[in-house]
Amino acid sequence: MEHKGKTALVTGAGQGIGRATAERLARAGANVYVQDIDAEALDETVSRLAGFDVGVVASVGDLRESALPEKMIQESVDAFGGLDIVVNNAGYIWNGAMHNHSEAQWQAMLEIHATVPFRVLQAFAGWMRPTVKQEMLDSGVGVSRRVVNISSVSGTQGSATQVAYSAGKAAVIGLTKTLAKEWGRYNCNVNAVAFGHIETRLTQSYEDDVPEIEVGGRSFRVGLSSRQRAGISSSVPLGRPGTVEEAAGAIYLLTLPEAGYITGEVITCSGGI
Ligand SMILES: NC(=O)c1ccc[n+]([C@@H]2O[C@H](COP(=O)([O-])OP(=O)(O)OC[C@H]3O[C@@H](n4cnc5c(N)ncnc54)[C@H](O)[C@@H]3O)[C@@H](O)[C@H]2O)c1
């Protein structure tokens, strides 16, 4: 039980990679604070987490509300006495070719993929900095803490029809690398995982009708046509998409004591793209 007694906060934990990450961390013994905009999906996550002998707090809300990050950090600390791992995972896609991209689309992708993690980590810093200062006075060293931000190969390599999404996923890498430089002194490692094609509702297959998801009362077209899917699979050396468990595994690796000297890195989890 690598994380027994620790606490992890995972955003976008209602389904997909976030849910699998919350489960992986709970299996390692961590108490989990799970957050999502989708109440029904988050309920399902909470039922699954009931199988682990850990504390669970669930919080429903739209992370784009600027006061929410502060509330989440406070609630995690109040419930479990501290916060050791923060996973900035919540996100969605809003695709389109450059000539069809609206300014609203650009702002929306930067907001969820860069501004929201910025606000979450600023709220985290508000609690972590004085806490670590006290830990150092008490024992000479701050507790080892980890931040894992979720990026994408769209952010590291670009992706046609995802100009705004790719910019948001590149911005979160700048946030990651800068905070790694600022927060080494607090013994807090800050890394990112850039995913390739992971099987979730964002990458579901379709033949004719393009599937849509709803986020915050608005619909977005998602999924991959069988032709796009075949193209992606042929460019993946492992020859298949990743599972959410494999994605969660990459995040989990960065939370382990063995990753204690890794910070400011972007780990690609893409089957070798
Ligand atoms: N699936 C992939 O192939 C892939 C590839 C690269 C990066 N990613 C990234 O991984 C992360 C997780 O994606 P996923 O594929 O698991 O998607 P998903 O849709 O299965 O899960 C994302 C979760 O985030 C939540 N969310 C979205 N906006 C929110 C908001 N404003 N407030 C609170 N919660 C919100 C959704 O409700 C959902 O439960 C995202 O950041 C995504 O961009 C995914």
Image (spheres, rainbow, N blue to C red):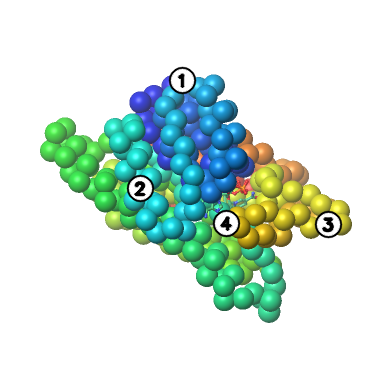
Query: Where's residue 61, x and y in %?
Result: 48, 49
- Kindly state the secondary structure of the residue where label 4 is placed: loop
Q: Is residue 117 left or right of residue 235?
A: left
Distance between mark 4 and mark 2 Cα atoms: 19 Å
- Kindly state the secondary structure of the residue where label 1 is placed: loop
Q: Residue at x 57, y 56 (%)?
A: 216
Q: Amino acid at mark 3?
A: Asp
Residue lying at the far left in this picture: please name it.
Answer: 137
Query: Where's residue 213, x and y in %?
Result: 68, 53
Which circle marks residue 71 in the picture? 2
Which circle marks residue 216 in the picture? 4
Is label 3 in contact with label 2 (beta carbons under 8 Å)? no
Residue 97 seen in the current view: yes
Residue that mark 1 sits on: 53
Disc 4 versus disc 3: nearer the observer: 4
Q: Amino acid at mark 1?
A: Asp
- Kindly state the secondary structure of the residue where label 3 is placed: loop
Q: Residue at x 56, y 42 (%)?
A: 39
Q: In terms of depth relative to the viewer, which is nearer, 198 or 95?
A: 95
Q: In terms of depth relative to the viewer, which is nearer, 259 or 84?
A: 84
Disc 1 versus disc 2: nearer the observer: 2
Density class for disc 2 (Cα within 10 Å; few <14, some 14-19, many ≥20) is few
Q: Residue at x 16, y 32 (%)?
A: 139
Query: Where's residue 64, x and y in %?
Result: 47, 58
Residue that mark 3 sits on: 209
Q: Which badge, 1 or 2, comes first in the chain's sequence?
A: 1
Density class for disc 3 (Cα within 10 Å; few <14, some 14-19, many ≥20) is few
Disc 4 versus disc 1: nearer the observer: 4
